[in-house]
Image (tube, rainbow, N blue to C red):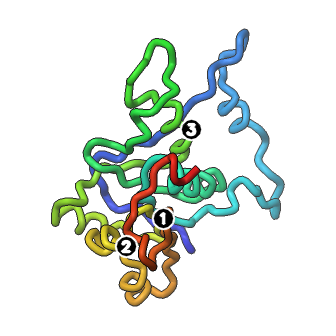
Amino acid sequence: PGQRSLPAIPRIVMVKQEAPPVRGRSSSRADERDSVDPAPAGHHDPMRSLDGLRVLEVAEMVGGPHASKLLADLGAEVIKVEPPGGDRARSVGPFPADGEGDRERSGLFLGLNTNKRSIVIDLESTEGRERLAGLVADADLVIHDLTPTRAATVGLDADVLLGQRPELVVLSITPYGSTGPHAEWAGTELTVV
């Protein structure tokens, strides 16, 4: 996939966690890594091997966010869609001692969502589903953790998407699969572990 520009999307927030400064130094480890001499011509940086890949994540808690984080860490552009109340992982610790319950400082959320961009979309509304469809149209890979019925309702039914765009990759992370008698069952931490 070639480089594309991201359409104008209001309320995108980069989730980025800076390394704390090392005592006696003014720069962070990220600054030091970025200041290293560029790789020689013809050298491929394995940490950027997915540059140019656009991933759309519609998932909460751990499964989907972890999968897309691995891709983001390898250079993919990941856009995380969050509901108006935010990903449920934002309310799960650990939290820093001075930030108990601060939804912007959840260790779980930050650990799973660095190197991503985030947008809040209300998938209950027609406008929200239209915005999601616009993001899907520009994605190379869609990762979601929705039940089959919920995925179809919001426009992420794999058969429909692949009928429109056969080159699209759709990854559905569900606890009981997308077919069969338990496909609509929700998973919990107890049943997944």
SS at mark 1 in the image? loop
Q: Identify the mark nearer the N-term, 3 or 1.
A: 3
Total labels drawn? 3
- State the residue at coordinates (56%, 38%): 111
Q: Amino acid at mark 3?
A: Gly
**Which amino acid type is shown beneath numbered disc 2?**
Pro
Residue at the spot of label 3 = 111
Q: What label sits on residue 101 in the rendered view?
A: none
Mark 2 vs mark 3, foreground winner is 2
Classify mark 2: residues with Cα within 10 Å, few (<14), some (14-19) or many (20+). Answer: some
Mark 3: secondary structure: helix
Q: Amino acid at mark 1?
A: Thr
Pick the residue in front: 173 or 142: 173
User: Contact (CB < 8 A) between labels 1 and 2?
Assistant: yes
The answer to the question of whether label 3 and label 1 lie on touching residues, with beta carbons closer than 8 A, is: no
Classify mark 2: helix, strand or loop: helix
Residue at x 23% of width, y 68% of height: 130
Q: Position of residue 48 (x, y in %)?
A: 68, 56
